[in-house]
Image: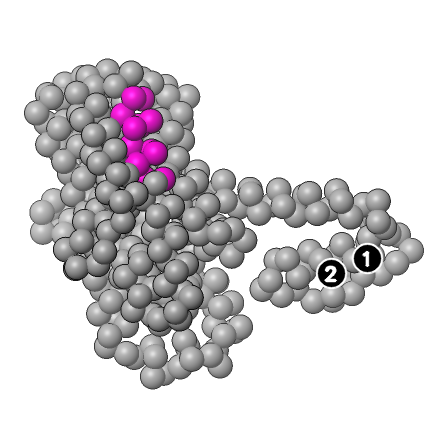
Amino acid sequence: MSFQSPLLPNKKLSFSFSDNYDETVNKLLGALPKEDKLNRELFANLGKWLILMISLIGGSFVGIFYFYVQIECQLLKSSWRLLGLMIAILPFVFYEYRKQKDSYQYSKENLLSFKSWKTMFIATTGHSIWTVATLISVNYTSVAQSYLFLNLHAIFIVGYNALKGIKVTRPEVLGSLLATFGTVFLAFDGNIHSTEGMVDLSKVTLFERIVYGDLVGILGSIAGVFYFTKNAELKYDFPVFLGIFAMSVIGFFQITIASFIFEGSTFSFDPMNGLFGVFTQDWFVLHIFIVIITGYGAYVCYVFALKYFDPLLVSIVLTLDPIVGAIVVFSLGWQSFPGPLTIIGFFVILPGVVIVTLSKSKRLRNSLQHSNQESFINAL
């Protein structure tokens, strides 16, 4: 591919785009004058950080949209989002297949493996339970508190490893105790208010908030353990984007069936309880935006962020979900800013999660030195 460069009007650039962002950028930089290279490298690095920040913001908006969209059948919110994600992710699946169709991951033997699909089903079920917990939790407590409870999976993974007989390090124990202690502050923060037209949290009793807001969020984190641990195993078996697409399809059917059974959803275009209500003028344009932010933003940018940054850094950055969520809903005037107990709880929980993440990363690197798949998965 060649084109006339606006920076170098007398010179044509010829190169081919590749999957490797750094390689493409380096080819472009090589054709630039020396005085321009530093600026271009800076912009390239800023582009990588922008991808990571978009992933953080996209993940933070999932619960915010669940809080904003008010319909009769709550589970349909997730069904609508997953339906849009299935469609939106297809171009990436086709592109991935074109690049990797001769690889083992796309071989018939691998894609039809019962073990892979069993792992996929367990991981998706964990994610679906986490999603349902999110839908319930954000209706009974603040978005900030809900996110804090829903993102304690790193702590529960420590307990999961202990139950499996895997050695737990002292930093992991310390981090888990800090996070547990921090949740006590969150449970007794009554400074939660929402604006008219949203869920009226002022009418939620302390008992309802602790049970349906906090404890359900914690149950969501426990379900997240199965999602993250089983999803780690899929790194060896499934192409990335095909895996996202498959999990979206399975999750869509799981949550939709649950909505039909427990909420009385219908096969109609009713904007309040219809499976196809997302295609009505009430919700269609909004859900295009939702898919772009929480689909391309949360999933696609996350995949690319892992290519450009250490997974440890990505994990730590994504623990800032509660802060981003709280700032967004406060800026939009949907909820009051978190009270002092929530803020104290956050600054107790966050170090605990970071300590566990750092310890887990160290153990992961040690297991990789032995090139042992089983030890790698256990380290997660």
Residue furthest out toward the bottom: 109
Asked if one can make out residue 121 in the rendered structure from this viewpoint, the answer is: yes
Q: Amino acid at mark 2?
A: Lys
Relative depth, front residue between 22 and 337: 22
Res 251 quadrant in image: bottom left
Residue furthest out toward the right: 10
Asked if one can make out residue 257 in the rendered structure from this viewpoint, the answer is: no
Residue 196 place in picture, x, y as percent: 27, 18
Mark 2 burial class by Cα count in 10 Å: few <14, some 14-19, many 20+: some
Secondary element under disc 2, as helix, strand or loop, is: helix
Mark 1 burial class by Cα count in 10 Å: few <14, some 14-19, many 20+: some
Residue displayed at 8% across by 25% down: 207
User: What span is colored magenta in the figure?
Assistant: 343-354
- Which quadrant is the C terminus positioned in? bottom left
Q: Is residue 341 above or below residue 102?
A: above
Query: Which color scheme is applied?
Result: one colour
Res 122 quadrant in image: bottom left
Residue furthest out toward the front: 170
Q: Which residue is mark 2?
A: 27
Q: Is residue 68 above or below residue 380?
A: above
Marks 1 and 2 close (CB-CB < 8 Å): yes
Residue displayed at 79% across by 58% down: 30
Relative depth, front residue between 168 and 253: 168
Residue displayed at 49% across by 42% down: 54
Q: Total label count?
A: 2
Res 58 quadrant in image: top left
Residue 87 place in picture, x, y as percent: 40, 58
Residue displayed at 41% across by 21% down: 331
Residue 189 vs residue 38: left or right?
left
Say the numbered circle drawn on residue 31.
1
Q: Amino acid at mark 1?
A: Ala
